[in-house]
Amino acid sequence: MVLEQATTRPATRASRPGIVAVLFGVTLGAWVVVLLRMRGMDAGPGTDLGSLGWYLGVWVTMMAAMMLPSAAPMVLLYARVARGSTAHPGLSTALFLTGYLIAWTVYGAVAYGLYHIVRSPDPSFLAWDGAGPIVAGGAVALAGVYQLTPLQQVCLRHCRSPLHFVLHRWRRGALGPVRMGVEHGGYCVGCCWALMLVLFAVGVMSVTWMVVVAAIIFAEKVLPMGERVSQVLAVALVAAGIWIAVAPGSVPGLTEPGVSEQMNGMLPAPTVALA
């Protein structure tokens, strides 16, 4: 069996610190790039996403920063098995990560398209002085409800059990690592798409909310009580959604679109609340 062959290689354990160092370095570098590129861009819900090319560049960097820590157990196990079953384990692991990020890139592209479909008619009810807070709060509450669905729980169990995936879904060949990465990334999207919806609802360019969502994803995927965390999170998200809908101005870390600028006479009207 592939896994048994991998565990017999002494170099496998020696490579683990190196892989951890690379993951840490890539994650740290991605956060630095995000901080530099998104400085001062948090306009709260409805923040303009810019051109598709610029947005996808930022989105992939965001996903590397937010998702690699929670994907580390899977990456480490994949690298361990690849060292015992492929001629170029380092390249194979890099291709696996590429496939993983491809899955999240597809999600980001779909979200971008939906954003412009919803925003193109410029509906007035999405304005922050209209139903905007209710729409944003509803999106956050929806994410909480999704945490309790069977689909989310199946995807979460997959993300928390990398050994089962590697044992039963191992693919050989030049494109095998990419296909495995995309497949694992698909499960990850199935587990976390609603949490990313929270990010869009409260401000996709907000570093503060990026940190919050990334911490939540890491807790439910990696910590021993992750499944319990997911259940508690469901209640917390529903409560947060109601809070945003009823009293958005009192929510810590939530930038209300156009509020501060209007106070300074810089904007004549509220911006759109939510894509």
Image: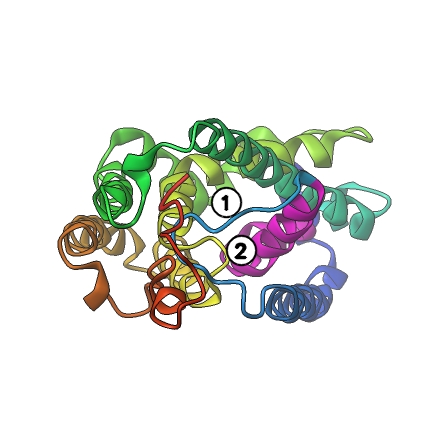
Residue 81 appears in the rendering: no
Mark 2 Cα-neighbour bin, 10 Å: few <14, some 14–19, many ≥20: some
Q: Could you tell me residue 48's position as x and y percent? A: 52, 48
| Front residue of this view, candidates 230 and 40 | 40
Q: Which three-letter amino acid code belongs to the residue tagged 1?
A: Pro
Residue 251 appears in the rendering: yes
Q: Could you tell me residue 150's position as x and y percent? A: 26, 30
Q: CA distance from mark 1 to mark 2?
A: 7 Å
Mark 1 Cα-neighbour bin, 10 Å: few <14, some 14–19, many ≥20: some
Quarter in which the C terminus is drawn: top left
Q: Secondary structure at mark 1?
A: helix
**Residue at the location (18% across, 50% down)?**
245
Using residue 222 as the reference point, say whether residue 94 is left or right of it.
Answer: right
* Disc on res. 73: 2
- Identify residue for label 1: 162
**Residue at the location (69% across, 53% down)?**
8
* Disc on res. 27: none
User: Quarter of the image holding residue 248?
Assistant: bottom left
Residues rendered magenta in the picture: 53-80
Using residue 155 as the reference point, say whether residue 246 is left or right of it.
Answer: left
